[in-house]
Image (cartoon, rainbow, N blue to C red):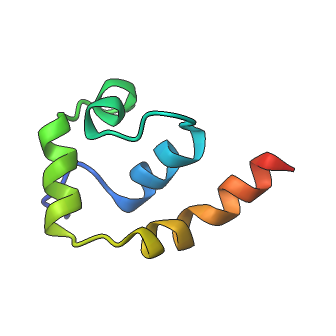
Amino acid sequence: MSKFKCSQDLYCSFLSVTSQRYSALSLSQVSPTNISHDAVSRWLTDTHCQPKQIWSAAKDRVLAESE
């Protein structure tokens, strides 16, 4: 079980539908689960997530939606 409330899948889903605001606060406000912006920030910091990794996971969703 993950110690984080946030996950790469949740973050990628958020990025694929967000057109302007990419903040931890924005994700916490629209998340289907009760998650604080601090939990999102901790996940981003502790997992050492690189933009390249996030793009790799999200690009198929983003490109599919733009077609």
* Side of 58 where 31 appears, left or right: left
Q: Viewer-proximal residue, 34 or 15?
A: 15
Q: Could you say which quadrant of the image residue 43 lies in?
A: bottom left
Residue 36 in the image, given as x and y percentages of width and height: 17, 34
Q: Nearer the viewer, residue 67 or 10?
A: 67
Could you tell me how many numbered marks the image carries? 0
Furthest residue in direction right, as rendered: 67
Image quarter of residue 4? bottom left
> Where, quadrant-wise, is the N terminus in this rendering?
bottom left
Q: Residue furthest front?
A: 20
Q: Position of residue 66 (x, y in %)?
A: 79, 48
User: What residue do we see at 30% from left, 70% from top?
Assistant: 49
List the single residue furthest toward the top: 29
Q: Is residue 6 left or right of residue 12?
A: left
- Would you place residue 49 above or below residue 39 in this image? below
Measured as percent of width and height from the top left, residue 5 is found at: 21, 48
- 9 vs 41, left or right, is right
Position of 54 with respect to 56 (left or right) is: left
Q: Relative to 57, say whether 39 is above or below.
A: above
- Nearest the viewer among 9 and 49 is 49
Q: With respect to residue 58, does 16 lie above or below?
A: above
Task: Please name the residue shown 40% across and 41% down the image.
Answer: 22
